Amino acid sequence: MLTDASNANTSGKVMEEELKLFLNTNDISYKRAKTNGIDFIIETPKSTLFVDCKNQNSMGSAEEKLPHTVWKYWRKYGYKEVYIIRGSHIPHKTIYEHLEWYPFTTHIVTMDEFIAVLNNQPLHQGIYEYV
């Protein structure tokens, strides 16, 4: 029997594979972290995108760990912005408020929204865009 953490990890891996398939199909260059790193570093003609897949579909502790995760990766990679691809669950407003204090921008998006970014379409920041 899988625990909630095991289910989340399996779900996250499925999302990673979905993004990997899209990148390979569209001949988009990327790197994967071997261990303890961000899921994808994607090279585009305009910039380097740092992307982590968090396929959370319900409330849970992974949501609360999100600010620390992006902070830890920022210390490792020094990015100016990071993309978190989320599942169907929209993180609580307090998570967005916490992230506003950081010296980098965190975009929490769906897979479809992230693919739109890769296709140079404007990014809608979601439910808390105007907070």
Image (cartoon, helix red, strand yellow):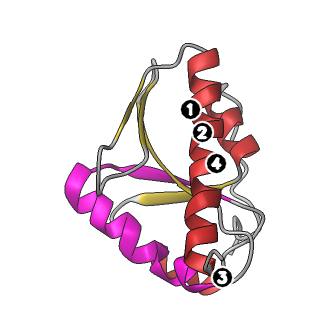
Upstream in the sequence, badge 4 or badge 1? Answer: 4
Q: Which residue matches tag 3?
A: 93
Residue 63 forms part of the magenta stretch: yes
Residue 17's label in the rendered image is 2
* Mark 2: few/some/many CA within 10 Å (<14, 14-19, 20+): few
Which stretch appears magenta? Answer: 60-86
Q: Nearer the viewer, mark 2 or mark 3?
A: 2
Residue 45 is left or right of residue 59, and the answer is left
29 is higher (above) or lower (below) than 56: above
| Amino acid type indicated by mark 1 | Lys
Residue 83 is left or right of residue 18, and the answer is left
| Amino acid type indicated by mark 2 | Glu
* Mark 1: few/some/many CA within 10 Å (<14, 14-19, 20+): some
Query: Label 4 vs label 1: CA separation?
Result: 10 Å
Q: Which residue matches tag 1?
A: 20
Q: Which residue matches tag 4?
A: 14
Residue 53 is left or right of residue 92, and the answer is left
Quadrant in which the N terminus is drawn: bottom right
Q: Nearer the viewer, residue 119 or 21?
A: 21
Residue at image x 49%, y 60%?
106
